[in-house]
Each structure stands twice: as structure tokens, then as C-alpha cells.
Image (cartoon, grey):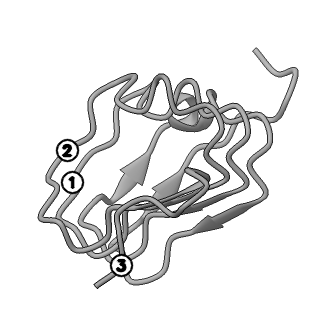
Amino acid sequence: MRSPCDAWGEIFYLDGKGIRGIAPGAFRGLSLLTVLDVSHNNVSALPEGAFNGLDHLLTLDLSANAFSTLGAGVFGGMPMLRTLVLHDTPLAALFWRSRGAR
């Protein structure tokens, strides 16, 4: 069984933990994370600011969750994000605000 956090503290595995929601700022203080896996849970909504403070996050895996829409402000706290995994969700709408947009 793997540890929720790898040896360097850069990858955080929360997959299959029965998570139903993520509060704004839940990952504050984990700014060095580069990969966050919250897949295979039952997250039905993600509030604006849920990922604030993840300044170095490159990959976010939200696959196999229950949300159907994601607002633009959800991803605002991850300026380095390059890969967003959303397969196996009932996602019907994704609102994205490009860098510099207001």
C-alpha cells in the first residue's frame, strides 16, 4: 500500500478515500505539491478557491468524481497547472478563465 504522500512531499494521493467535498483553501500550506490525485471519490462540487495555494501544481486528477460543472474560479490558485484529468465524470460544463482575464 502506498503512502498518501511520496517521500519528497511533491505528490499527494487522495484517490478512493471517500471524499465528498473540498473546502476552499483545503490544500493551503502544500505549495510544493506538483501532482494531486483526488480521483475515484464522490466529490459533487468544487467551490471557488478549493485549490488556492498550490503554486507549483502541474497535474490535477479529478477523474471518477460526481461533479457536473466546474466554475472558472476553481482553478485560479494553480498558476503552473498543465494537466487536468477529468475522465469518468458527468461533467457537462467547464468554465475556464484564461490568464489575465477578469
Type of amino acid under label 1: Ser
Of the residues tagged 3 and 1, which is closer to the observer?
Answer: 3
**Separation (CA) of disc 2 from disc 1:** 7 Å
Q: Quadrant of residue 75?
A: top right
**Front residue of 48 and 95:** 48
SS category of the residue bearing label 1: loop
Type of amino acid under label 3: Arg
Point out which mark residue 21 bears: 2
Indicate the position of residue 59 as horizontal and vertical percent values.
Answer: 66, 61
**Separation (CA) of disc 3 from disc 1:** 26 Å
Point out which mark residue 44 bears: 1
Of the residues tagged 2 and 1, which is closer to the observer?
Answer: 2
In the image: residue 76, left or right of residue 101:
left
Q: Who's the residue at 81% across and 35% down the image?
A: 98
Report if the CB atoms under discs 3 and 1 are less than 8 Å apart: no
2 or 3: tag closer to the N-terminus: 3
**Front residue of 7 and 75:** 7
Is residue 9 positioned above or below 67 on the image? above
- According to the picture, the residue beneath numbered tag 3 turns out to be 2
Report if the CB atoms under discs 2 and 1 are less than 8 Å apart: yes
Q: Farthest right residue?
A: 100
Is residue 95 positioned above or below 18 on the image? above
